[in-house]
Amino acid sequence: MALVSTDTKIAEYLTELHQLIKQTQEERSRSEHNLLNIQKTHERMQTENKTSPYYRTKLRGLYTTAKADAEAECSILRHALDKIAEIKSLLEERRIAAKMAGVYSDSDPPRKTMRRGVLMTLLQQSAMTLPLWIGKPGESPPPLCGAIPASSDYVAKPGDKVAARVKAVDGDEQWILAEVVSYSHSTNKRHTLSRRRIIPLPQWKANPETDPEALFSKDHLVLALYPQTTCFYRALIHTPPHRPQDDYSVLFEDTSYADGYSPPLNVAQRYVVACKENKKK
């Protein structure tokens, strides 16, 4: 019953999202007419080679309208982004509920039967669909946006992806990509780890063009997911992202190279977190 209820909510939210997209298109069509009037007014001013009080008054009114149109469109788009976030949250809740009930889909098969190629594709999709933080003017990026760490009292929720420090088969400790099942004080479940051995992964991408302070800077020591694996290793930031869709370029610590670092490799924002150990191994 819970899964059916969730499916119903998702369908409702998708309908609302469709309406918001239509409203955005309608709002943009209205604003385009006003922007065209602004362009034509400027062209007339250039032709007449003068800026009369009439043109100043007209332009002031046109720009005021354009500003109001842009704010209205922005409001609708933010509402649509919120709706998308709600839909993604419900999809994640449904996935976790299905897993707990032993029901699996083709896109999320049982872990024991998941092929490596499928897993790598899912990790890439997770990185690509990580939402971009779009704050209001003057608003600072929140915790778990890009390089901004979680707050000190943050407790990871079921389904959250984290970097977890666990003991390998040979007894050595390593950082692996993990999914939170639950948070409790019991110690008899799978990998049961203290909060100190968990680093939540970013929940938003930081925009380098508007929030560069929310990104790791060049030469910053981080833990990054090594390409085509599910393990995090120490690395230095070689080049931060320049555009929202860009990855980090990182140098992994590697003693097989003369300078102790690998050639630059690309790692998505989703899989780069702060390294708590400052000393090089």
Image (tube, rainbow, N blue to C red):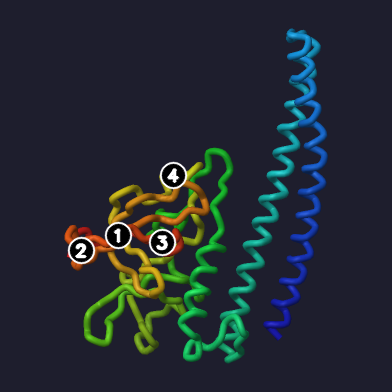
- Mark 1 closeness class: few <14, some 14–19, many ≥20 residues within 10 Å: few
Q: In which quadrant of the rendered image does the C terminus lie?
A: bottom left
Mark 3 / mark 2, whichever is N-terminal: 2
Give residue 166's position: percent from left, percent from top: 30, 79
Foreground residue, 4 or 280? 280
Foreground residue, 152 or 128? 128
Give the CA distance from mark 1 to mark 4: 24 Å
Between tags 3 and 2, which lies in front? 2
Cβ atoms at labels 1 and 4 below 8 Å apart: no
State the residue position of label 2: 257
Q: Amino acid at mark 4?
A: Pro
Mark 1 secondary-structure assignment: loop
State the residue position of label 1: 263
Give residue 54's position: percent from left, percent from top: 81, 11
Mark 4 secondary-structure assignment: helix
Give the CA distance from mark 2 to mark 4: 31 Å
The residue at 17%/60% (across/down) is 258
Mark 2 / mark 4, whichever is N-terminal: 4
The residue at 77%/68% (across/down) is 12
State the residue position of label 4: 212
Give residue 248's position: percent from left, percent from top: 40, 55
State the residue position of label 3: 267
Between tags 1 and 3, which lies in front? 1
Q: Amino acid at mark 1?
A: Pro
Give the CA distance from mark 1 to mark 2: 9 Å
Cβ atoms at labels 1 and 2 below 8 Å apart: yes
